């Protein structure tokens, strides 16, 4: 029998809230005021941007320059982690620093430092004295977390594109079940860097209006920034449990999902199998729901394969933006709050224009509740992840 894994209340920050309660309320009531218009390449696009000032995150013996603690990605990670510092200190007292791990999912956590340093280089023909390639490495933000709390357990960085935050939760659970760790800080973080925007824009995946997932009129994503973290523990640190998880790979295309939805369906079935429940036990599904033509179609087909009847579903990306490597953890946080608070399900914001090729009608369900939720994260390369969270009642 697999060891149970419990998740602490999430600590997070994004354009829709500075903590889990603010985010949950925004999702239930369809509040999307966190978007601002940003200019890229001479054109303006809606971006989910954190508006409040973020403190610097420099820590002792870790450098004091801009790269060590003043980049936006590190400040966002730090702002989220500050909400769980008391819990982390209790973990250290309980288990010792060597038994606490870190597992961070992210898409682009290094180009920000790289661009700052290279712009300085182009201006002065020399890199800044405080710059080091380490600061732009994929592993640097995860190492920052470990150094911040002087943790001695395993430190992992997960880069499975837009499934990274959800993948990090799965890897964290495995680290506990294997005995490598007694507890793990796990989640995801990303910003809207110029590099990321240019990449998605080159794929013609970015919408210049508010995203409209599953509508026949959908035309792309709104990018967003944010971070979300859980503490995972085999002991009951909250009433919410990671009941099951599933992963699959389409092996179809570098960026596009498989056309039949079978890859995402496999991930959902695997999560249900691990949880030991049938699909009708799921009370709510947080959709990947990016608002792109191919992703929405593939997810709709997958849902039809797994669920025999209509269940409450919604995409919360119209509220948060697509936060890339943070999305899986941020949307798991929405599910955590949904099963714990029972004050309503996140609504689905769209124009209501049904698409016959994406035949799964999103349901607005603000006045319902759920004890078991599924959240989907599907990524480039056909990397599919589904998590199931439920309340221990």
Image (tube, grey):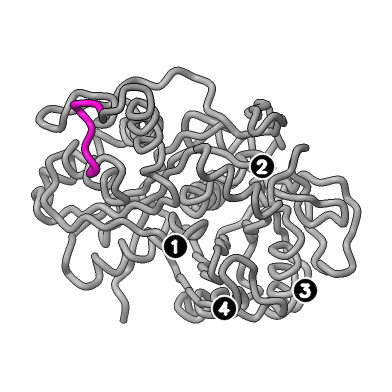
The answer to which of 183 and 236 lies nearer the viewer is: 183
Residue furthest top in the image: 53
Q: Secondary structure at mark 2?
A: loop
Q: Is residue 174 above or below residue 126?
A: below
Mark 2 and mark 1: Cα distance apart in space? 20 Å
**Which residue bears the numbered disc 3?**
309
Nearer the camera: disc 4 or disc 3: 4
From the top left corner, tell me how far across and down residue 224 is, in percent.
Answer: 57, 39
Q: Is residue 316 above or below residue 266?
A: above
Do the numbered discs 2 and 1 sit on residues whose CB atoms are within 8 Å? no
Nearer the camera: disc 1 or disc 3: 1
Residue drawn at point x = 35 percent, y = 35 percent = 113
* Disc marking residue 160: 1
* Disc marking residue 222: 2
Which is nearer the N-term, disc 2 or disc 1? 1
* Disc marking residue 148: none
Mark 4 and mark 3: Cα distance apart in space? 25 Å
Q: Which quadrant is the N terminus positioned in?
A: bottom left
* Disc marking residue 250: 4
Q: Is residue 146 above or below residue 279?
A: above
Do the numbered discs 4 and 3 sit on residues whose CB atoms are within 8 Å? no
């Amino acid at each position: 029998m697999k060891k149970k894994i419990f998740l602490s209340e999430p600590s997070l920050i994004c354009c829709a809230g500075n903590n889990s309660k603010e985010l949950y309320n925004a999702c239930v009531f369809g509040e999307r005021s966190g978007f601002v218009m940003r200019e890229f390449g001479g054109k303006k696009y809606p971006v989910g941007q954190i508006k409040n000032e973020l403190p610097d995150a420099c820590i002792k013996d870790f450098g004091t320059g801009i790269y060590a603690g003043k980049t936006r990605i590190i400040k966002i990670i730090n702002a989220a982690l500050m909400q769980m510092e008391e819990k982390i200190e209790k973990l250290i007292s309980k288990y010792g620093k060597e038994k606490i791990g870190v597992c961070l999912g992210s898409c682009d956590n290094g180009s920000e430092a790289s661009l700052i340093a290279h712009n300085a280089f182009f201006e002065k023909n020399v890199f800044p004295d405080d710059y080091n390639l380490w600061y732009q490495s994929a592993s640097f933000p995860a190492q920052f977390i470990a150094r911040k709390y002087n943790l001695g357990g395993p430190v992992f960085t997960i880069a499975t594109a837009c499934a990274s935050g959800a993948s990090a939760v799965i890897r964290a659970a495995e680290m506990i079940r294997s005995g490598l760790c007694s507890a793990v800080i796990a989640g995801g973080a990303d910003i809207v860097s110029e590099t990321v925007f240019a990449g998605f824009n080159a794929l013609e995946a970015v919408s210049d209006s508010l995203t409209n997932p599953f509508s026949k009129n959908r035309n792309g994503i709104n990018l967003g920034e944010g971070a979300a973290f859980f503490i995972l523990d085999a002991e009951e640190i909250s009433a919410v449990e990671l009941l099951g998880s599933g992963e699959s790979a389409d092996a179809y295309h570098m960026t596009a999902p498989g056309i039949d939805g079978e890859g995402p369906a496999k991930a959902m079935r695997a999560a249900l199998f691990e949880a030991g429940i049938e699909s009708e036990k799921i009370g709510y599904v947080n959709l990947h729901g990016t608002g792109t033509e191919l992703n929405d179609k593939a997810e709709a087909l997958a849902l039809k394969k797994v669920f025999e009847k209509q269940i409450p579903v919604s995409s919360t990306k119209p509220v948060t933006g697509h936060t890339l490597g943070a999305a899986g953890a941020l949307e798991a946080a929405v599910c955590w709050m949904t099963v714990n608070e029972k004050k309503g399900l996140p609504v689905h914001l769209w124009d209501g224009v049904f698409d016959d090729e994406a035949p799964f009608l999103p349901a607005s369900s603000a006045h319902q509740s759920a004890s078991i939720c599924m959240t989907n994260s599907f990524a480039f390369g056909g990397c599919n992840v589904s998590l199931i969270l439920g309340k221990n009642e």
